Each structure stands twice: as structure tokens, then as C-alpha cells.
Image: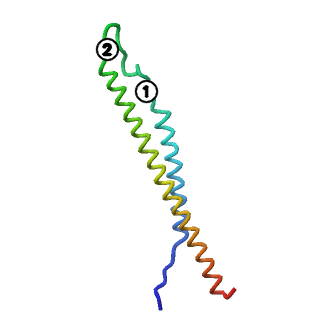
Amino acid sequence: MGEQYRVDLSALEDTVRKLNGVLKDLGNAHADTRYKTSLSPSALGADAPGATFLEARKLTQAHTEMKTHIEEVVQHLNEVMDKFGSNTRKAHGNYQNQEAETATSMSGE
């Protein structure tokens, strides 16, 4: 007799539910990185008459670069989690359908 395999559909459902929570949190993180981390060009200091405050300009530029990088990382995480969630939902549906077909064929209908 062949080995039997069984998929725990409730575990897959729990995984999908948890992934949806992660995606919600990532959505918040995406909005926060985009809209709540702005820094005005003069926030770290401004040029004085007849002088250039290079350090303030460098810090502002570094902030802009880091902000962009964090936005890209959060976007990538969002895409990966969305893909994983979609694949998990598909797998759950496929296993559920297979289980229903097997139950139907075993009952002789």
C-alpha cells in the first residue's frame, strides 16, 4: 500500500491570515517611509550669507539616499510577501479542491 500524505488546510489558512497581517504592516511601513520621513533641505542647517554649509548639504543628501533605499527595500518586501501569499492561497485552494474530488470519488458519486 502506498504512503498517504495529508495537507493540513487549517495550517495553510493560518499562514494566509498571518501573511495578510504582514502585508498590512508593510503597507503601513511603505506609507510611513514615503510620507513620514521627509526632511526639508534646511532642516539640518542652511547656508549663511557668503558661506556654504557643506556638512548640512551632505547630511541632507545622505538622508535622501537612505530614504530612497528604505522605500525600495519595503517595496521589495511587499512584492515578495504578496507573491508568497498568493502562492499559498493557490496551494490551499488546489489542496482543498483535490480533497473534495477525492472525497467525492471515494463516496461513489
Please indicate whether residue 103 sits to the left or right of residue 74 in the image: right
State which tag comes first along the sequence, 2 or 1: 1
Q: Secondary structure at mark 2?
A: loop
Quadrant hosting residue 39:
top left
Q: Position of residue 104 (x, y in %)?
A: 65, 82
Which residue appears at 46% of the width and 45% of the height?
Answer: 75
How packed is label 2: few (under 14 Cα within 10 Å), some, or many (20 or more)?
A: few
Mark 2 sits on what residue? Answer: 52
- Kind of residue at disc 2: Thr
The disc placed on residue 39 is 1
Residue at point 51% right, 62% down? 87
- Of badges 2 and 1, the one in the foreground is 2
Q: Residue at x 53, y 59 (%)?
A: 86
Q: Looking at this view, is 39 or 82 the one in front?
A: 82
Q: Is residue 62 left or right of residue 27?
A: left
Q: CA distance from mark 2 to mark 1?
A: 19 Å
In the rendered image, the quadrant that contains the C terminus is: bottom right
Picture disc at residue 27: none
Left-right relation of 9 to 108: left
Task: Tell me residue 24's x, y (percent).
Answer: 53, 48
Q: Are marks 2 and 1 in contact (CB under 8 Å)?
A: no
9 versus 66 height, above or below:
below
Label 1: state its secondary structure: loop
- Counting from the top left corner in percent of width and height, residue 42 is at 40, 19
Residue placed farthest to the top in the image? 50
Instruction: Examine the image and state in which quarter residue 89 appears.
Output: bottom right
Relative to 35, residue 20 above or below: below
Q: Amino acid at mark 1?
A: Leu
Residue 71 in the image: above or below residue 83: above
